Amino acid sequence: MTIIAIDGPAAAGKGTLARRLAAALGFDYLDTGLIYRAVGMGLARAGQDPADPALAEAAARALTPEALGAGDLRGDDAAQAASKVAAIPGVRAALLDFQRRFAAHPPGGRGAVLDGRDIGTVVCPAAEVKMFVDASVEKRAERRLKELQAAGRGGIYADVLADMKERDDRDRNRSVAPLKPAEGALLLDTSDLDADQAFAAALSHLREKG
Ligand code: C5P
């Protein structure tokens, strides 16, 4: 089974790249951020604190695949709640099995592309292909602002940038599974690449790997 592990910070372009690679190869795709978002928002919706370790771990253990389909998981509230539950070791441990099962037994049976923060380092360290997709925080904030505007939600650049920095900081400095490139990962800086160029660079890396 071939596993492609793609990690990187928010809005670096890893989701777009992961989806395109999965479609091109006929692999299944798992957006692992959505799992943390579902756990975080489940608590927030119930008026509970996503940073509470006991509550968050219980919510992670009780997570069902259906919860990943909730309509409010793409917004910034979900992103902030996700990064809070994601810093709790018991939550990460509870979600490992779900991710590893998907990687080892993707529904289509051909291969899996997973994206997140710790796929190459923790979830699938033996993945055949690893990539770390990054871009400057200013470029990532610009992209996120454009996405928000396209969705008719507006936003202020300074606020988006501050949110992005806060989440980066939490993800990079947490004690368990901090965001960092896996050993042997292709480093792909998309600050000056569009989605087509990033896809082309990833494909040529795949070809080199055979
Ligand atoms: O990728 P996305 O922005 O949806 O992820 C939301 C949050 O979930 C991240 O900021 C991070 O805190 C957490 N996350 C994680 N490990 C992953 C995927 C996401 O810690 N593999």
Image (cartoon, rainbow, N blue to C red):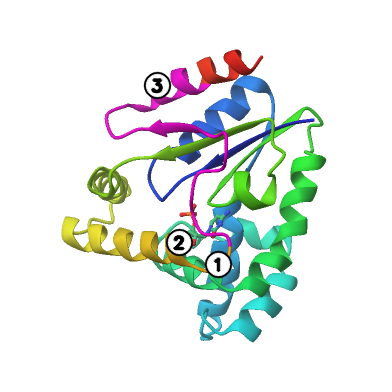
- Evaluate if marks 1 and 2 touch, with contact meaning CB atoms under 8 Å apart: yes
Side of 157 where 34 appears, left or right = right
Quadrant position of residue 185: top right
Q: What residue type is labelled 2?
A: Asp
Provide the residue designation for mark 3.
Answer: 196
- 2 or 3: tag closer to the N-terminus: 2
Provide the residue designation for mark 1.
Answer: 86
Residue 31 showing in the rendered view:
no
Image coords of residue 80 (percent x, y): 42, 68
Alpha-carbon distance for marks 3 and 1? 31 Å
Q: What residue type is labelled 1?
A: Ala
**Label 1, ligand 1: CB separation under 8 Å:** yes
Q: Nearer the viewer, mark 1 or mark 2?
A: 2
Q: What residue lies at 74% left-to-right and 30% top-to-bottom? A: 111
Q: Is residue 207 magenta?
A: no
Side of 173 where 56 appears, left or right = right
Q: Which of 154 and 60 is in front in this view?
A: 60
Label 2 element class: helix
Q: Nearer the viewer, residue 33 or 42?
A: 33
